């Protein structure tokens, strides 16, 4: 099984091109933050084909948050007499997660920003509870 699911922000300009056969292909890097170490970010090369590529190019820009589902593909080539390897994610589907008309100024939500998460940081001060109020 070769399946990848990523959520992140587009970190480069979207490069839309067309093959000689007329198929659209767009490429960009996706900045994906490690949920366990917020200081570590990976920049993953993404490749999208056909109509999905055109839609991504038309509706997204650098900074847009997207969800990508696809598969890992490893290309091997020779340059200057040396064998090189290039790993990328070829997307099967892309979901646009940045709301319309918000531009790229919207701050990315925190990892635990799910409103149903009882442990999320709401930004409010902790309630003042005395020891007499505790049942133990």
Image: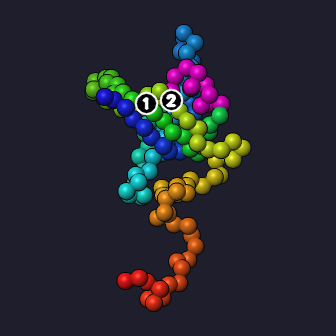
Between 9 and 99, which is closer to the camera in this rendering?
A: 99
In the rendered structure, the answer to whether residue 88 lies left or right of residue 48 reads left
Residue found at x 27% / y 26%: 83
Write down the quadrant of residue 80 in the picture.
Answer: top left
Q: Residue 70 carries which label?
A: 1
As displayed, is residue 12 above or below residue 37? above
Camera sees residue 12: no
Mark 2 neighbour density, 10 Å: few (under 14) some (14–19) many (20 or more): some
The percent position of residue 6, horizontal first and vertical second, equals 45, 40
Which colour style is shown? Answer: rainbow
Q: Is the magenta stretch mostly helix, strand or loop?
A: helix
In the structure shown, which secondary structural element does the residue marked by tag 2 occupy? strand
Residue found at x 52% / y 57%: 116
Residue numbers of the magenta segment: 47-58
Q: Mark 2 points at which residue?
A: 93
- Residue pushed farthest right? 101
In the structure shown, which secondary structural element does the residue marked by tag 1 occupy? strand
Whether the residues at callouts 2 and 1 have beta carbons within 8 Å, the answer is yes
């Amino acid at each position: 099984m070769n399946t990848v699911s990523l959520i992140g922000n587009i970190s480069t300009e979207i490069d839309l091109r067309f093959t000689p056969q007329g198929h659209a292909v767009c490429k960009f890097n996706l900045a994906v933050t490690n949920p366990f170490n917020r200081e570590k970010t990976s920049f993953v090369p993404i490749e999208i084909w056909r109509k999905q590529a055109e839609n991504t190019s038309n509706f997204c820009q650098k900074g847009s948050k997207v969800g990508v589902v696809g598969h890992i593909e490893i290309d091997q080539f020779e340059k200057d007499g040396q064998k090189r390897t290039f790993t990328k994610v070829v997307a099967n589907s892309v979901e646009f997660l940045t709301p319309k008309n918000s531009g790229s100024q919207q701050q990315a939500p925190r990892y635990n920003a799910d409103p149903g998460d009882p442990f999320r940081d709401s930004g409010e001060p902790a309630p003042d509870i005395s020891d007499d109020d505790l049942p133990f």
